[in-house]
Amino acid sequence: RETMADVAAEMSLEDVTTFNICLGKQLVAEGKEAPLTFKLDEEVFVQLYSQKSTGRAHVIGLPDDAEKGKADCRYKVRFQDGTTHDVRVQRILPVVPGRAIILTSETEDFRHMCRTQVDKQDVVVELGCSYAKATKILCEQAGDSHVVGVD
């Protein structure tokens, strides 16, 4: 098990990709802005309206060519419980692979990132935790011993 100090010692700027993600709008990665698009079998997170335990899913169907790029295009996804749904692109976020620094300008986007980008093996430092609402989400995702919130 890695500690936060171990992770920090191992990381260099070459190991880290910085992402700025706004739900349903665009992905800014490595200084390049692009509309959100997804590939078959890509792991994604869906903003849920239901009581599913997680919104993690895999893309199993792409929008028609005529629909691609439209704000309301839909992707077919399969959730971890095996159910499938057609989901509007505005409700889908990419799951960023590997080590990353994720920045958001809105609190609600940040809380979505806490649910989508953190897994049990992750070590997390949250800067600006305020009343710790997002810290609680991070602890649910990564485990209490892997999260530090600093305000």
Image: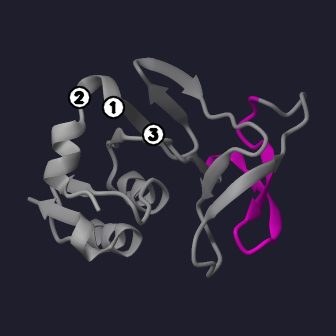
Residue density around tag 1, few if under 14, some if 14–19, many if 20 or more, within 10 Å: few
Nearer the observer, disc 1 or disc 2? 2
Question: Would you place residue 86 above or below residue 22 in this image?
Answer: below
Question: Can you tell which quarter of the image residue 58 is in?
Answer: bottom right
Label 1, label 3: how far apart the Cα atoms are? 16 Å
Describe residue 57's horizontal placement relative to residue 134 as left or right: right
Residue 127 seen by the camera? no
User: How far from the left and from the top, in percent, is residue 149?
Assistant: 16, 63
User: How far from the left and from the top, in percent, is residue 6?
Assistant: 18, 49
Closest to the observer: 139 or 27?
139
State the SS at label 3: strand
Label 3, label 2: how far apart the Cα atoms are? 22 Å
Q: Earlier in the sequence, mark 1 or mark 3?
A: 1
Q: Quadrant of the N terminus?
A: bottom left
Tag of residue 12: 2
Q: Which residues are magenta?
A: 69-90
Q: Which residue is mark 3?
A: 21
User: Which amino acid is tagged 3?
Assistant: Ile
State the SS at label 2: loop
User: Which amino acid is tagged 2?
Assistant: Ser
Q: Earlier in the sequence, mark 3 or mark 2?
A: 2
User: How far from the left and from the top, in percent, is residue 124?
Assistant: 26, 56
Residue density around tag 2, few if under 14, some if 14–19, many if 20 or more, within 10 Å: few
User: Which amino acid is tagged 1?
Assistant: Val
Nearer the observer, disc 3 or disc 2? 2
Describe residue 101's horizontal placement relative to residue 44 as left or right: left
Q: Is residue 151 magenta?
A: no
Q: Is residue 74 magenta?
A: yes
Q: Which residue is mark 1?
A: 16
